[in-house]
Image: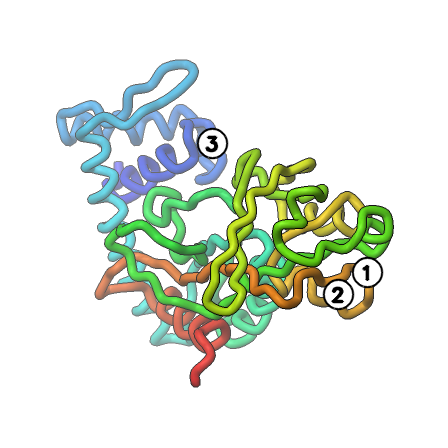
Amino acid sequence: MDRLESMAVFVDVVQAGSLVAAAERRGLSPSMVGKHLRALEDRVGLRLLQRTTRRQKLTEAGELFLERCLALLQQVEAAEEDTASLGGGVAGLLRISAPTSFGVTRLSPALAAFRQIHPRIEVELMLSDAPVDVIGDGVDVAFLLGPLAESGLIARPLEQFYQMIVCAAPDYLALRGVPQVPQDLIDHDCLGHTRWGLRHAWRFMAGEEMIEVPVRYRLRIDHGLALREAALAGAGIILQPHALVSEDIAAGRLQRLLGGYEARGRQLYLVYARDRAAPAKLRAFVDFALERFGPVKG
């Protein structure tokens, strides 16, 4: 069997979570995927995956082998794409991950412009507010919210997309009143993201003073756009990115609150693997993203 193909199959099995899912991804039968795995294990003389009918887990040897496979396959892919680019532009499949709100409102429209510049690059965009493992999840580049843990990856700061705004529908405010100071939020129906937990502190700046208000969520949803819809229906007060609610505020569907206080935002980063031989498709997108979403130059 071709050794590189077997390595690619092994990576897909790990990332997809099962032989069946990897088989569907690669267009192979599950039995052929199993043959590729056995061929690798016979070659290295060690078990790479512990498999049962319900789950699979990498062995210690498998974890090391996965790391080496990812690095080698990336180098092979970069070599092929860089060589192919000599004949007509950058090409290849680019896997991108981003937070849902940013991906829907800003990144998806930008990708249309990116593909006009690089029509031979195929893009697979994954939107999720869950943590992303750039290497382990097989992502080429990710937009992540900080602060970031030390990972050895390259993290480039971008614009302050996550300038947070407190707002609510006029109908809700007519019924419950308009909060005048952050502490008033304690007596209101606040809506939060499920990742924030049952209780979460909303932080505001008043000049140099930081004000922290613990709020208890009456409704929690795992999607920023769904929180926006709930607020539009009068369910309560939300704290969401400006880009997600700005049109609703301008149209009067939502009313901005606590204008004299600045809600603490979160920094957005462009994150990708540190590799001198980065594929041309990745270099092209990094340049595009930094130009499109990079920090405002003063």
Q: What residue sits right under mark 2 in the picture?
A: 249
Which residue is at the front of the view, 36 or 95? Answer: 95
| Residue depicted at x 77% and y 43% | 235
> Compared to 298, does 126 lie above or below?
above
Residue 167: % across, % down: 70, 57
Using residue 183 as the reference point, say whether residue 28 is left or right of it. Answer: left
Work out how far the residue at label 3 is from the one at label 2, CA to CA, in angstroms.
44 Å
Q: Secondary structure at mark 2?
A: helix
Instruction: Evaluate if marks 1 and 2 touch, with contact meaning CB atoms under 8 Å apart.
Output: yes
Work out how far the residue at label 1 is from the one at label 2, CA to CA, in angstroms.
6 Å
| Residue depicted at x 57% and y 73% | 113
Quarter of the image where the N terminus is located: top left
Q: What residue sits right under mark 3 in the picture?
A: 21
Amino acid on which the number 1 mark rests in the picture: Arg
Using residue 97 as the reference point, say whether residue 250 is left or right of it. Answer: right
Amino acid on which the number 2 mark rests in the picture: Ile
Q: Secondary structure at mark 3?
A: helix
Which residue is at the front of the view, 272 or 257? Answer: 257
| Residue depicted at x 65% and y 57% | 181
Work out how far the residue at label 3 is from the one at label 1, CA to CA, in angstroms.
44 Å
Of pointers 3 and 2, the one earlier in the residue sequence: 3
